Image (cartoon, rainbow, N blue to C red):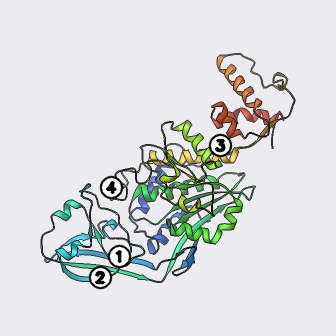
Amino acid sequence: MKTVIDMPDSDMSGNDGVGLFCHTLAKELFPICRSLTGPGVRQTLSVIKQHLPGLEIHEVPSGTRVFDWTIPDEWTIRAAHISNQAGERIIDFNDHNLHLVGYSVPIDQWMELDELNEHLYSLPEQPDAIPYITSYYSKRWGFCLAHKQRQQLPQGRYHVVIDADLEPGVLNYADLIIPGKSSREVLLSTYICHPSMANNELSGPVVATALAMWLMQQKQLKYTYRIVFVPETIGSITYLSRHLQHLQEKVIAGFNLTCVGDDRNYSYLPSRDGNTLSDHAALHVLKHIAPEFRCYSWFDRGSDERQYCAPGVDLPIASIMRTKYGDYPEYHTSLDDLSLVTPTGLEGAYEAIRQAISVIENNMRPVVSVKCEPQLGKRGLYPTLGTKETGEQVADMMNMISMCDGRHSLLEIAELTGKSFFYLLKIMQPLLANGLIKSV
């Protein structure tokens, strides 16, 4: 029986290869100003498509109704700055795209500092950080700056310029379908709507890209894989509005990919159900690779799992993360940069999610084909040299066989015995080859 974990990995695999690939891709994407809509989203998807040629990029017109929401107008930003009376630019969008409030309307106006301050945003508790602020559904304009800089602004007149368009256009999203033997699907979703932030934005798309490349290299997949790149919230709602019935019929497991880039902790956020194949696979893998991982509840949610697991949608989507969104000090600020996200952090998350996928891909309901305890010796399954190690392996094999009743999955057996799924899968291979175990 050929399994995903036995198949050769791509040239980028290995502890350094995947992480470096992801970090390099993140560097390329980092300067792009993304939002819910606009050229930045299309540019980002175009770069990802270079690695995933089969990626299909779609568009939905502004004003389209998607469940209880409406696709907003498209935002195009070209330049934005604030200058003092001497003509010196004290805040410039070109220096950092977090300086501008997302979806700011155009303006070209002189004003006094008191009036300007009504449109400035800073973080007194993080005086060196530029905050990330958006106003998607209410028309306004604003600039963000470090609080230290804001406190030093002198009284006087300031020239505010925002060269932008906010008018009917399209919302873009993309998906990639990797077919398997079964039409049943595993869904991987990530978002492409934030400007220059590394962990909260780019870690998800780059790890999703690496996972898609790995999946495409597998010679035989049991399940079909659907990899989705959407603007957060409105994008997943749009995607569900177009594919809901199909997803409900076909998706058996899946993960929302976000905040998978730092070197700190590992985190798990369950599906709303909490008892899906995705949940069990994620918990099993994290327990074995990062026993100190942090376990959250559904009530700690905050990303697109809100949509995929919503009542009436009820898809089995869980999340494996590094440090969860909202729980690290750099979150939604300019401090969430490429020094926070590291090759090792990205590789670690990639490997955790890859293992969870491999658990799903290789899970089965095994049943023993003989009555009573099988005779291992005549099948060449009993070690010829008795050592402590071989004795433990035989005990593990017999414990596993004792649970192969067609009612327990291999993942359930791994949990019951306290052994790694992949360790039991390795022991299972000769039993399957000898016909002693069959998968039902």
Q: Position of residue 351 (x, y in %)?
A: 55, 45
The amino acid beneath tag 3 is Ile
**In the image, which is nearer the foreground, mark 2 or mark 3?**
2
- The x and y percentages for residue 350 are 53, 48
Residue at horizontal 77 percent and vertical 40 percent from the top: 407
Q: How dense is the environment of label 1, judged by Cα within 10 Å: few (below 14), some, or many (20 and up)?
A: many
Q: Secondary structure at mark 3?
A: helix
Q: Earlier in the sequence, mark 4 or mark 2?
A: 2
Mark 2 residue type: Ile
* Lower position in the chain sequence, tag 4 or tag 3: 3
CA–CA distance in space, label 4 to label 2: 28 Å
* Horizontal and vertical percent position of residue 87: 17, 77
Q: Is residue 230 visible?
A: yes
Q: How many marks?
A: 4
Q: Answer whether residue 17 is visible to the viewer in this image.
A: no
> Badge 2, how many Cα within 10 Å: few under 14, some, many 20+?
some
Q: Amino acid at mark 4?
A: Leu
Label 2: which secondary element: strand
Mark before the other along the chain sequence, 2 or 3: 3
Please say if the residues under marks 2 and 1 sit with CB atoms less than 8 Å apart: yes
- Choose top left, top right, bottom left or bottom right for residue 334: bottom left
Residue 104 got which mark? 1
Q: Is residue 329 left or right of residue 113?
A: right
Q: Quadrant of the N terminus?
A: top right
For the residues labelled 2 and 3, the Cα–Cα distance comes to 56 Å
Label 3 packing within 10 angstroms: few (<14), some (14-19), many (20+): some
Residue tagged by mark 3?
5
- The quarter holding residue 59 reads bottom right
Task: Indicate the secondary structure of the residue bearing disc 4.
Answer: loop
Contact between marks 4 and 1 (CB within 8 A): the answer is: no
